[in-house]
Amino acid sequence: MLSICLRHSSPHLSCTSALALTLSTSTRHSALSTSTRHSSSQGIVIPPRIERGPTDLLEALASTVGKDHTAPHYRYHDDPWLIPYKNISKRDFTLSKEAGKKAAQYILNKHPDLFDQNRIVAEPPITAFQPRAAYNRDNVTLELLDNLVTSCQVQDSIEVFNLLNEKGKDIPAEVKQSLLELVAFYNENEAEEEGMESRGMLKEQESWKVGGFVDQMYSEGGVATESERVAMLVGLGRHSGGQRVWQMYQECKANNDKVPEEGFNAAISRIGTKEGVDKIMGSVKEVLSDMKEAGVSPTVNTLISALGVLAFTAQSREYEGCCRHSLDLIAEFRLLGVEMSLGVYKVLLDIFADKKANSKSPILSDILKQLDGKDIFLAQNPQDVWFMPRAMQVCNQQNNAKLAWRVDEFLNTGHNSRLMSDFQVLNVYYQNFLTVVLQNDEFQTAMELYNKITPHSFSPMFSYYQILMNHLHANGALQHLGKVWDDIVISNYAAANKENQYVLTHQVMQILKANDPAMSDFTGLSDVWVDIARKVFNHLEEGKSNKALYLRFNTLAPDICDLVVAVALREGNYELGAKVVEFCREEKTVMTKSLSEGVLGDFINASVALGEKDKAVGAVEYSVDVGSSQAVQVGLVVAGTDMRADQRDYLNKLFTSHTGWVNI
Amino acid sequence: MSPLHGLSHMVVVREMTRSTRMSVRPITTSCRMLAREDGKRNYDAATILEDEKKGVFRVIEIGKPKDGDRKMFKRRGGQGAAPPPRSASMTPDQAWGSVWPAPRTFHPAAVPLPVRQGVVQTKAQVVPSKYANAELMKIPNFLHLTPPVISSHCQAISKFCTAWPKGLQTEEDMDEHFPITITTSDYLNSNSSVRDRRARIVQVRLKLDSLPLDSHAKDKMIRLVGDRYNEETGEMSVTSDRCPYRGQNEDYCKYLLTALLHESWRVEDWERKETEDKEVFKTGEEEEGDRREALEALLNVGEDEVAVLRYKEEVRKMLGLPEQLVVPTVVGGEVGGE
């Protein structure tokens, strides 16, 4: 009898990604060896198999894929016409996608009978996509309530509970208790759907529903039991119940309840911050000693709550006291073996880096030294997510670009970038990052960073663009101006209101005026200048009757027109200049100021030189209408040219009341 | 609950509310949007009184304004030109593996190459460019597997690879120590169901030389497996798809191999025939007559000129005929010289 022994010695070939719609196959070959037939005379040594999990190969391959900065976020459709560039569009896209999902679920729940015979059978079946059952008096039972509570269906269980109460059924105490815990934990909202934050939806910050279902249930039950009180305490703490948290905590303490760690954390976070630091620390220590007596070991959340209380006080006075106490607290918790999460460091930054006093606290570089190279993207506390933006804010306040780069490096180690979950976090982080690098680092580096991040990772605010354009002007880096201006336009003037839009256009026109393309090393700038000037003017013209800012109230409009004409004439583009002058003529009653004399003079000279007599006469008329002091001069200039009779008469008529005019 | 219920308190970061100079309009006579472009008559509080003094009075407008809708439409701010495609901002030294990580339908805006594809009927036409080119989209592309990307993938996977075993350098070594190959296939799809019935098929391949068989056993084994034996490679393959699960099919194949091995060694009574079926024709051993080598060569090896000639000689010898000498003749062309 021969025995065949199995040995899988050749590795799998990995499957291609499951996102492919086409079929893909992979074949697995395994070789079996006969061990008794030929003993290994040559001494075949098969190295032992390196164990790997089912997705390890895929993860290894995925680790070779970095971030593509030229691409929009994965959630958007990758088409040049459909990529959102404005913050509003990005938000709209996310919200509309969610709205679509909700609408589909609404239809599914409203008409479940239409979805009985599906062509596509999901195997294994997906309960989340099946229509929700409607509950009425007939089909509610106690087991149903039990099931709903254990599977965390908050609103369904409330409905079923009410129906059972109406029916008059007697509900056992444990079911009531678990229902109370469930509803208190979720504050009567549905449990958050998985993946909401990764799709870009922000969590709603709701406070406790006072007088809602939970409060009613609690008060109806007569004298509260220990577990009920604890459930209320935890629920209130989770959803910012205000003063009731402290009251509930005192109640629990009075009744010697076994308060869990979350209860203690909630109590600490509600310690009043009006008294001095020492009193606050006293209360904190009290709660902590209660914890010790109860035998509950504190976690990092406790530490963060305690530090959070200190952070409030650090803003006002007693800065050193808060700092000292916070460091003591951290040392103690470290002795207890509590692992620090990013939230701790975030609250530390809140304490040490004072927003107003501009203190140059070196706390951030110490923190970064601690965190160097660590991959701690698993968030344990909501504050963890805010560490990066806060760190960047601190860097910006302290004007420290090197630290900013270190924070960015930390963000890119391992999976830490997963912490940047929603728009708010992203915006704060990148706004501060871009600003601090622009203002404190080399211009070239700042431009590279800007080009990398805009517009897909982040669309900057208009304040950043102002600073950027100033730097462009100061560094003479005019080759970037075209792209920067395009970015500004496509992001809808960086989401600025109408006034600020004109501030931006005014600024760019000033830069255009101040920098003569003929003097710079770059070619082709002249066309870019004219193009920008034209776009600026079109923007002004289209916005003249905009409800937000009428032309008559737009104080910058005349300056803008002025600069546009100046630039147009300098770059030899007469039509644009003529168009602007025409516009100013039409709107002369509405615009607050008129075109400046120098510019008008240049224009008239140019018109005369090009033989555009009508326009020249029109310009002269304009200068007379606005009461310019050089009206007569320019009139004489025009008069010097060869003109038709009616034009001569018109000029004479214009200047009838002017001294120094000689009829021609 | 309406679908938008949950959205009513979505946190939306609002940009700064704009500050308007005129916070309250004193009189509103009609919609601002109905104001006419040419500015001749503005139904605007500030200008109405002046107009009336000049003798220009307001005209009542009953019914839907005609250019009102168009005005509103225009106010939306038209589409504008699309920004340049992404390929314009890609640098030549970017990480292509990050841009195109997985197989993907060809997307012209993301590929920084000026590829063209298509057939043209006349010389005057130009081969179509990559934008809106269905031909480029239909064919499979391997943009996700450029050589540098493949090297980076190999580097990433290499940590799971062990060294090739020493002593397994040649194919013969591998056949000797690892003779059996089992092949199964996995099928992926993006359906709501992940199952595919074809994944149950198992094929076991084995070289017959690696089995301990004598001549009778080998002969019987080949007869038993029939078509499944490949004469050129000496390999037999057994495929099973009769069971619903892959593991069951694999077990069944192994059972079949075991059964075949044992069966081919067994000699049944009915196998012993008076005239046995042999693969090789042999004469002169037990029966009458001498060895008929030429005949054996013809029947066992095959026919060709030499073999047929030899057979002829043998038969002539048997029949007592004189031998024929074979005279070589020169075919074609003169031999130079002699």
Image: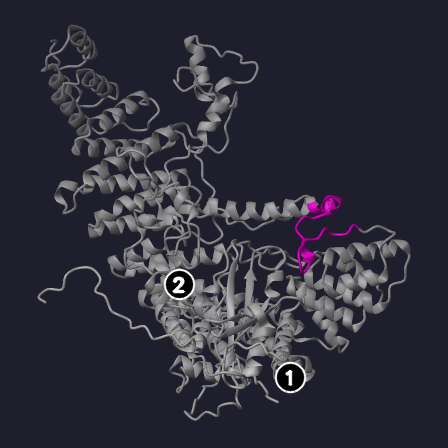
Quarter-wise, where is residue A504 in the image?
A: top left
> Secondary structure under badge 2?
loop
Is residue B136 positioned above or below A56 on the image?
above
B9 left or right, relative to A496: right
Is residue A199 positioned above or below B250 on the image?
above
Please report, as a chain letter, where disc 1 is located.
Answer: B
- Nearest the viewer among B181 and A508 is B181
Q: Read off the magenta span.
A: A108-134
Three-letter amino acid code of the residue under disc 1 = Val
Number of numbered discs visible in the structure rendering: 2
* Residue B207 horizontal/vertical position (percent): 50, 77
Q: Which residue does the image show at 38% across and 17% down from the upper left?
A: B38
Is residue B168 positioned above or below B154 on the image?
below
Quarter-wise, where is residue A537 in the image?
A: top left
Image quadrant holding the C terminus of chain B, namely bottom left
* Residue B165 horizontal/vertical position (percent): 41, 84
Q: Which residue does the image show at 60% across and 56% down from the upper left?
A: A205
Taken as a whole, is the magenta stretch helix, strand or loop? loop
Which numbered disc covers residue A66? 2
| Residue B195 makes an appearance in the image | no
Which numbered disc covers residue B28? none
Q: Which residue is mark 1?
A: B267
Characterize the local packing of mark 2: few (<14), some (14-19) or many (20 or more) Cα atoms within 10 angstroms.
few
| Residue B41 makes an appearance in the image | yes
A611 left or right, relative to A543: left
* Residue B227 horizontal/vertical position (percent): 56, 67
A636 left or right, relative to A538: left
